[in-house]
Image: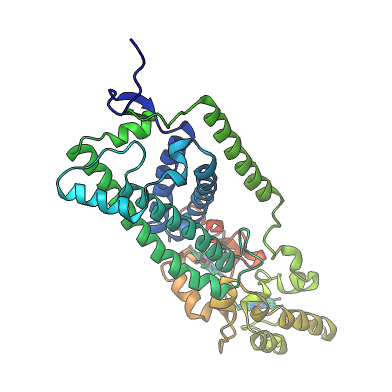
Amino acid sequence: MPHINSEASIPEEKLIWDLPLRVFHWSMVLTVAIAALTGYFFEEWWLDVHVYAGYSIGCLLAFRLIWGFVGSYYSRFHTYPVKIKDVTLHLKSLMRGKSEPHTGHNPVGAWMIMVLLSSLTLLIITGMVVWGGQENQGPLAQLIGYKVGDFSEDIHEILANILMFAIAIHILGVLVETFVFKHSLIKSMVTGKKATTDTKASVTIWHTLRGAFIFGLILTGVLYWGAIAPSPFMTETHVFPAYKQECGECHPAYHPSLRTASNWQAIMNNLSDHFGEDASLDEQTTQEISTYLQANNAQSFDTEVSHKIGRHDTKSMRMTDTRYWQKKHDEIKDSDFKHSSIGSKVNCNGCHQDADTGRYDDEKIKLPKGVKS
Ligand code: HEC
Ligand code: HEC
């Protein structure tokens, strides 16, 4: 049979979507689902899972943005029919109850993808700002202050709602195309094939290799960064040895970021009557510890704990009398604080494995067996 190559030729099943694009698509579905579930429903305790999902989405996005320029024909952004003219034509045909088949994306679908990719990009950026500002972690830990992180959280949440809305429309569009207009888009995104007379798409094994190479580079870069990234700036070595020794005798030596300068001063000026105990030290040691604590008071740290607990003076000088502390621990029973491996509410280290670093991350809370919160 002679080879016919005209507009009138019979549509053939052809490979339209390259493998890297399809793997990208379904990996995105999975990671966004994990990020959304952990973000909306399991907030705090699952924050690390949420963050890992975020890093994965970031890698996938970086890949997709590059692939939009070097992928196979229909993966490239310049092939997207996004002109206003294309969109109005498509909308008009939809109103007549028809959806013109498009080999690549149809104009509405192409716009949808732009909205999805840009809101995801903004979500990853704001997410890293929150992670750096509020938790002092990730690539922006040293750059972003607590307040900026806090503000960014609101933006992050608004963007998440926009994304959820866009995803709902995207899925609705795909369902309408599939069941009303009988264009099997879902099958295409799995097999990569579509019936078409198109001759522009020529997907080859080279696309797969190129995609794997590019993704490999991105992943290596991110993992390498993860391995060499400076660990969070507050470490135990920050603690002054004499302080740790003298003030860690009856309870843990609390991180200096947990109190205000004036509360530390008041505590140090009154060691002979220290919460009913005599904790007096010789004059020189008292002076040294007092200087250390005041120099490293909550104002000199930009962490969540320093803002929520440390910067609030209390009359009793106790951090356990701050409103934030009480709110966070109001579900813990008195008898649980007295559990043999904790002893008292002032033994922060009994439940917070990272108490000495002053971080108090959610994922570092370990309660002894039988203690519920
Ligand atoms: C002789 C034992 C002892 C020594 C030494 C000691 N403390 Fe205390 N400290 C206590 C007791 C007891 C409490 C109250 C515990 C409670 O309410 O269960 C307390 C409470 C505190 C609290 C308030 C905890 C809260 O409820 O928020 C701070 C802050 C504190 N100590 C700081 C220090 C500093 C600083 C030093 C070193 C100069 C020090 N302590 C040395 C016994 C001691
Ligand atoms: C009996 C175990 C226990 C002890 C002791 C304890 N905590 Fe907690 N703490 C918890 C639990 C559980 C949570 C999580 C509460 C929640 O998120 O609902 C928590 C939450 C927190 C948070 C909030 C963390 C965040 O990012 O949401 C801070 C800060 C904190 N604790 C500080 C302290 C300090 C300071 C002390 C010592 C004075 C202390 N805790 C003693 C169990 C304990």
Display coloring: rainbow
Q: Residue furthest top?
A: 1
Q: Position of residue 312 (x, y in %)?
A: 56, 84
User: Is residue 117 found left or right of 267 in the rendered image?
Assistant: left
Q: Which x, y percent locates residue 279?
A: 71, 80
Relative image position of residue 334 (x, y in whole percent): 45, 69
Residue nearer the viewer, 290 or 333? 290
* Residue 178 seen in this snapshot: yes
Residue that extends furthest to the right in the rendered view of this protein: 284
Quarter location, residue 346: bottom right
Report the residue at 63% width, 80% height from top: 259
Q: How many marks?
A: 0
Judging depth in this view, the residue of 291 and 340 nearest the camera is: 291
Q: Quadrant of the N terminus?
A: top left
The residue sitting at 16% across, 50% down in the picture is 95
As drawn, 185 above or below 33: above
Task: In the rendered view, tell whether residue 282 sits above or below residue 131.
Answer: below
Considering every residue shown, the one lying at the far left of the view is 96
Image position of 235 (left or right of 81): right
Q: Nearer the viewer, residue 342 or 89?
A: 89
Which quadrant of the render holds ligand 1?
A: bottom right
Q: Is residue 168 visible?
A: no
In the foreground, 156 or 3: 3
Residue 4 spot, x, y in % from top left: 34, 19
On the rendered image, what quadrant is the C terminus found in?
A: bottom left
Q: Quadrant of residue 102?
A: top left
